[in-house]
Amino acid sequence: MKASNLNDMNISELEIKLNDNLESLQNLRFQKALQQLENGSIISKTKREIAQIKTVLNEFKLGIRKS
């Protein structure tokens, strides 16, 4: 997901996307443990997206971004 897409989302959409990414990260880690994961770079991309979403949510909380 690009950062410009995150800028267009509101807080509730960001929280839904964050929960979806956290669940998918957990599933990817299970797949990696069971050696069913073909592409390990998906985990790092998911973690990066989670960090971006958390940053935007924190900016809303601090008042840097306005909804």
Image (spheres, rainbow, N blue to C red):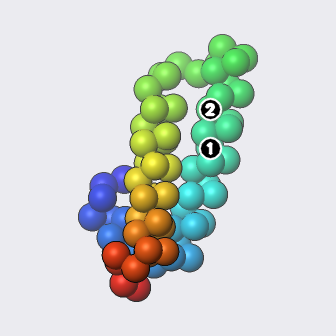
Q: Element at badge 1?
A: helix
Mark 1 and mark 2: span between their CA atoms? 6 Å
Q: Is residue 52 above or below residue 36?
A: below
Residue 38 rendering spot, x and y as whole percentages: 53, 19
- Give the structural element (helix, strand or loop) at label 2: helix
Q: On the image, numbered disc 2 is attached to which residue? A: 28
Residue 16 in which image quadrant = bottom right
**Residue 12: which numbered mark, if any?**
none
Q: Where in the figure is residue 30, as x and y percent of width and height?
A: 71, 27
Contact? badges 1 and 2 (CB < 8 Å): yes
Which amino acid, mark 1?
A: Ser
Q: Residue furthest top?
A: 35
9 in relation to 40, above or below: below
Quarter of the image with the C terminus is bottom left
| Left or right of 12, for residue 59 | left
Q: Amino acid at mark 2?
A: Leu
Frontmost residue, 58 versus 36: 58
Mark 2: few, some, or many residues within 10 Å (few <14, many ≥20)?
Answer: some
* Residue 1 drawn above or below residue 66: above
Horizontal and vertical percent position of residue 27 = 68, 36
- Relative side of 24 to 54, left or right: right
